[in-house]
Amino acid sequence: MAEETLLEQLLVARGPGGEEIEVREVCQQELQQHCDEMWVDDAGNLIGLIRASAAGGDDANGVLVMAHLDEIAMTVKRISDDGTLKVVALGGANPVNFGMCPVDILGNNEKCPGVLSFGSMHLTASSKQGRDVQTGNVHWEDVHVVTRLSREQLETAGIRPGTRVVMSRHWRKPFPLQDAVAAHFLDDRAPVLAVLNAAAQLFSQRSELKRDVYLAFTTMEEETNAGALFAARHLPCRTAIAVEVGPIGEEYGTVLSASPIIVAGDEKGHYSRQVIDALIAAVRDAGYEAQVALLIDFASDASAILSVGEMGKVGCVAIPTENTHGFEIVLRDGIAACTSTLVHLLTGDLLS
């Protein structure tokens, strides 16, 4: 499948935490031709295994490469008598990350349209919501979803507290921007694409692999990292690599370029020196100069695994991204550079 077509399919697919089925199905279709084995585990992770054919492979020394399926979303907290929904964040998001926009309400029996609303700009400061909207200081308590359905109709559709609410497919298509692409949910669809592309290359270069590679497209990263933690506990791997989007900003010394960000540490801990050095070398072998950054307000599946002691050696490579958790922008060459970095890392002698 053409790369642009695949990226659009990944972006249009809806994947709130715990209900990543649509995204997983797109990945399954692409991954199955580039793996020796493929399965969905009990946590909903899609796992692809590429076996090392080089002599001396160790069945218990695999490398776990992770990109997450889920996206920031919302979940229903309460249904009002008039059929409007009170919602809260599912993952690290503020209302401004979505804006006032069309949404899809993923009921058990029916998917219903809605509109995310902050209220009118013409309210006055005499109400808290009016003050928050006028100052741009909008909180989740100020937000509701207009459905134009009755409580009974919503119940028939299978909509209840806990039902996922996502940005509508109406606003999900990618927007070309010169040498870049912009869209909601490039976190983590751009890394997913990079890993799928890497799978195709690694499968054709199995003779160069020194250890088995487990490609995990994980669930629930934005909330609890539950999918990655499950995978780390059940797969025979000693090293884990998270593939992410990375924020650009002066405070981190990162810029929007093709050069991958190698994360030295984040809010959950510092990554393994050995893996960091291997990733930096892989970036250089791929023809780029690594952007090494300590990302204070950031976390990944790999640092979650490290923080609970599920694995001792972890790292994170990230595609430089503008507007993380918003209308994100990545360079097309940034996706390619990430793919090349992974291939050089996994086919060389960088990981000992």
Image: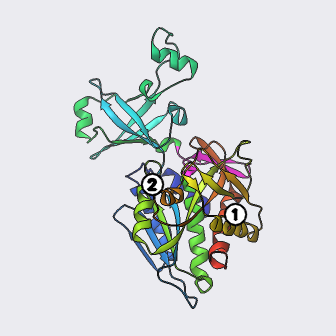
The mark lying in front, picked from 1 and 2, is: 2
Q: Is residue 23 left or right of residue 57?
A: left
Q: Indicate which disc residue 337 carries.
A: 1
Q: Quick check: is 185 in the magenta stretch?
A: yes
Say which of 309 and 23 sits in front: 309
Q: Which residues are drawn in magenta?
A: 172-187
Taking the spot 54% from the left edge, 36% from the top edge, the residue there is 97
Which part of the image, by quadrant, shows the C terminus?
A: bottom right
Quadrant where the N terminus is found in the figure: bottom right
Q: Quadrant of residue 116?
A: top left
Dot placed on the residue nearer the N-terminal end, 1 or 2: 2
Q: Is residue 339 visible to us here? A: no
Q: Which mark is residue 328?
A: none
Per the image, is 152 magenta? no
| Spot occupied by residue 196 in the image (x, y as percentages of width and height) | 55, 67
Q: Position of residue 6 (x, y in %)?
A: 55, 61
Q: Secondary structure at mark 1?
A: helix
**Which amino acid does the dot numbered 1 rest on?**
Ala
Q: 162 or 177, which lies in front?
A: 162
How far apart are the two marked residues, 1 and 2, measured between alpha carbons? 25 Å
Kind of residue sitting beneath label 2: Asn
Residue 141 at x, y percent in the picture:
42, 26
Above or below, comparing residue 121 to residue 44 in the picture: above
Query: Which residue is under mark 2?
Result: 225
Q: Residue at x 71, y 42 (%)?
A: 251
Mark 1 closeness class: few <14, some 14–19, many ≥20 residues within 10 Å: many
